[in-house]
Image (cartoon, rainbow, N blue to C red):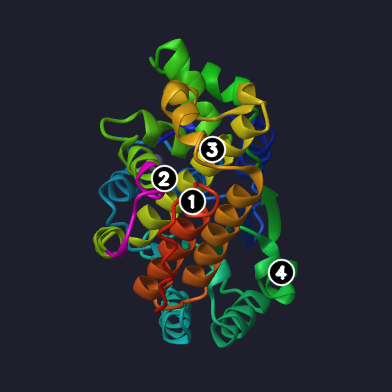
Amino acid sequence: MAARWKDIAGHDAVTAMLRNMLSSGRMPHALLFVGPAGIGKMLAARILAAAILCGGGRDEACGECQSCRLVAQGSHPDLVELAADGSSLKIDQIRALQHEAALAPYYGSGRVFLIEEAERLTVQAANSLLKILEEPPEGSVFILTAASQHAMLPTVVSRCRVFAFRPLAPETLARLLADRGADGPRAAMAARLAGGRVGEALALLAEGGLALRDAALALVAALPAGGAALVWTQGTALDKLATPELAAFLRHLRQVLRDLLVIVNSCEELALNRDVAGELRRMAAAWDARRLDEALGAVRDAGRAIEGNANTRLTLEAMLIHLMEAAREGTGNADRRRYTV
Ligand SMILES: [Zn+2]
């Protein structure tokens, strides 16, 4: 079953504008959907693409014609999706897209090019895309998604109609999750942890969805007594995670450390992981605010370095050593070994 507008949780103003463009036939040739990962940008882009290809001036794809069937199967020749090859979208990919864009549509109602994570375009690729956007082939629509427009070439952004996908308020998200069958306390917890992103909240509620959070908790619990073996085993395990999972793990790790910080500062009601409050309280006894701050900085720096293409394994090991040192200081542990990589 292809997705429908009603499957998008929240973002009412954005979807209303998109539907209005479809039914009025005033579709810009380039759109940019901006917002954090897991918020629904790609879902909206695919629903929009299906409606454009279905044609007929309706605000939603009919779901029954041949075009709609091909979209649902993921094999519509007029729908071209482009995602990063490794960590970036490269010039060769845009050149291939340029060739594609020059072809006439197979089904007559136009062609749609979906470019995911457009902030990953290299400068050359972005400049090459800019040339296409300046003189777009007749009937083609480019839908770009990005976490932030500030990481993109301003000239590319200026060629696009920008739509902002904002995180939902935790209460709104919790209500939506409850409507989809999550029980109250679990819905509230997922809404808090997901930072207002529907996709992320649904992933947390799925079977095993809290595994990465639990792994982050276990790591923080092991830090005060950790040694070289911890660096090795955790470094090996984390290095095996796919990029999005590693990013999610680091986010959970920051959230756990942040929860310890609010507990140390006597504001436990602000903790995100309230379902494990007892465990957090026990762990918080080994920390103080200054060292938690340092630990949070270490995790943030590691995340940035990995995003910036640093060696993942070495970055993670350096982070683990930094975390262990922060955990140990002031615990009265005489064994204050220092590690270097
Ligand atoms: Zn259709």
* Amino acid carrying mark 2 in the image: Val
**Residue at the outermost top position:** 184
For discs 3 and 4, the disc positioned in front in the rendered view: 3
* Amino acid carrying mark 1 in the image: Ala
* Residue shown at the point (68%, 78%) measured from the top left: 134
Labelled disc at residue 327: 1
The secondary structure that dominates the magenta segment is: loop
Mark 1: C-beta under 8 Å from nearest atom of ligand 1: no
**Magenta extent:** 221-228
Name the residue carrying label 2. Answer: 220
Q: Judge the density around disc 4: few (<14), some (14-19), many (≥20) Cα neighbours within 10 Å.
A: some
For discs 4 and 1, the disc positioned in front in the rendered view: 1
**Do tag 3 and tag 1 residues touch (Cβ < 8 Å)?**
no
Name the residue carrying label 4. Answer: 159
Marks 4 and 2 sit apart, C-alpha to C-alpha, by 46 Å
- Compared with 30, 130 (above or below) is below
* Residue shown at the point (51%, 34%) measured from the top left: 285
Marks 2 and 3 sit apart, C-alpha to C-alpha, by 25 Å
Labelled disc at residue 197: 3
N-terminal of the pair, mark 3 or mark 4, is 4
For discs 2 and 3, the disc positioned in front in the rendered view: 2
Mark 2: C-beta under 8 Å from nearest atom of ligand 1: no
* SS of the residue under disc 4: loop
Q: Judge the density around disc 1: few (<14), some (14-19), many (≥20) Cα neighbours within 10 Å.
A: many
Q: Is residue 301 left or right of residue 242?
A: right
